[in-house]
Image (cartoon, rainbow, N blue to C red):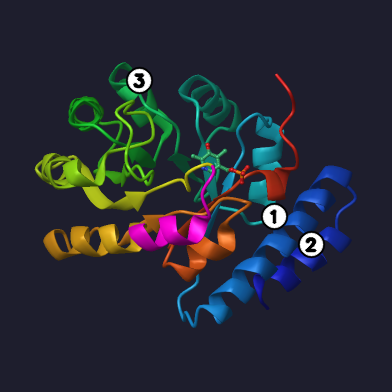
């Protein structure tokens, strides 16, 4: 049974109204992923990460019950509290996808299995040290799966807010690859505002290819949100980060 069919049937078999809503939204998103994958002639299927920022731990539990195993969060404080409230659930994987300050590294490695947003050497070093401590204290065994965030704005402004400039990526990748506690796994990017996502994701695909030439293990590509999922799949995204189209409009805070 494909994902969409499975989620449609889960929607029919629940008495919880919110679970039903989530299941129907998941079915619709998986239909889009299927169609985009066929249109792109892809045989592999991108992994859906459901972004639960601003939504409660109870939704994460509902998603898990529906079979979702990959959860994304973008604020350390919210994510840490939520992961603790959810507690250990079978095979549940937390992806940290938000902007990161190096003083948050210690906190993030307590719950995140993946970090998508390393964009400076300082962050990489912070995560290395934090992981060294976690491993030393016996809290973790495996290296942290790490993606480097690239800034797709063209030209890249000097504000340093949207990821690593492509021209600095090689040095950043070297820093990550030199840590035994980090597993350099690929790249993450967000389509720039005010530009069509296709050309931006096309640039990303080229940047990813260059990175793989130096680091063959860095084969993951985290790109695509609710609005631009299809463009990301067309340009080789292996991981999609979808919030709104699964959870609904984010509550105003
Ligand atoms: C919130 C967020 C997403 C999900 O965006 P939606 O538009 O809700 O699908 C993806 N990536 C990052 C980095 C985010 O912060």
| Residue 6: image location, x then y, percent | 73, 69
Q: Give the image quadrant in which the ligand numbered 1 is located.
A: top right
| Residue 23: image location, x then y, percent | 76, 56
Between 224 and 206, the residue placed more toward the observer is 206
Query: Relative to 93, is 215 on the left or the right?
Result: left
Mark sitting earlier along the chain (2/1)? 2
Disc 1 designates what residue? 66
Mark sitting earlier along the chain (1/3)? 1
Residue 200 lies within the magenta run: yes
Instruction: Identify whether 230 is placed above or below 192.
Output: below
Disc 2 designates what residue? 10
Query: Relative to 44, is 17 on the left or the right?
Result: right
| Residue 164: image location, x then y, percent | 28, 38
How far is disc 1 from disc 3 in space, using C-alphas?
A: 31 Å
How far is disc 2 from disc 1 in space, using C-alphas?
A: 7 Å
Q: SS of the residue at dot 3?
A: helix
For the point 73% across and 63% down, the residue is 27
Q: Nearer the viewer, mark 1 or mark 3?
A: 3
Dot 1: within a 10 Å radius of its alpha carbon, few (fewer than 14), some, or many (20 or more) residues? Answer: some
Between 66 and 97, the residue placed more toward the observer is 97
């Amino acid at each position: 049974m494909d994902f969409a069919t499975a989620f449609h049937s889960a929607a029919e078999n629940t008495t919880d109204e919110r679970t039903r809503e989530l299941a129907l939204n998941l079915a619709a998103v998986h239909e889009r992923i299927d169609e985009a994958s066929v249109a792109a002639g892809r045989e592999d299927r991108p992994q859906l990460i459901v972004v639960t920022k601003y939504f409660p731990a109870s939704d994460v539990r509902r998603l898990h019950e529906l079979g979702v195993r990959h959860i994304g969060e973008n604020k350390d404080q919210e994510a840490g509290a939520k992961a603790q409230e959810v507690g250990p659930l079978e095979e549940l994987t937390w992806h940290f996808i938000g902007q990161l300050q190096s003083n948050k590294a210690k906190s993030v490695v307590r719950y995140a299995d993946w970090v998508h947003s390393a964009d400076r050497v300082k962050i990489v070093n912070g995560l290395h040290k934090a992981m060294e401590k976690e491993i030393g204290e016996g809290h973790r065994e495996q290296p942290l799966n790490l993606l480097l965030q690239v800034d797709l704005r063209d030209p890249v402004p000097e504000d340093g807010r949207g990821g690593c400039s492509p021209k600095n990526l090689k040095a950043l990748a070297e820093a990550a690859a030199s840590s035994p506690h980090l597993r350099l796994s690929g790249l993450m990017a967000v389509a720039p505002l005010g530009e069509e996502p296709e050309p931006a994701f096309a640039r990303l695909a080229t940047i990813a290819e260059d990175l793989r030439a130096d680091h063959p293990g860095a084969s993951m590509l985290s790109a695509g949100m609710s609005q631009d999922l299809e463009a990301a799949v067309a340009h080789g995204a292996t991981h999609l980060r979808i919030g709104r189209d699964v959870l609904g409009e984010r509550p105003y805070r």
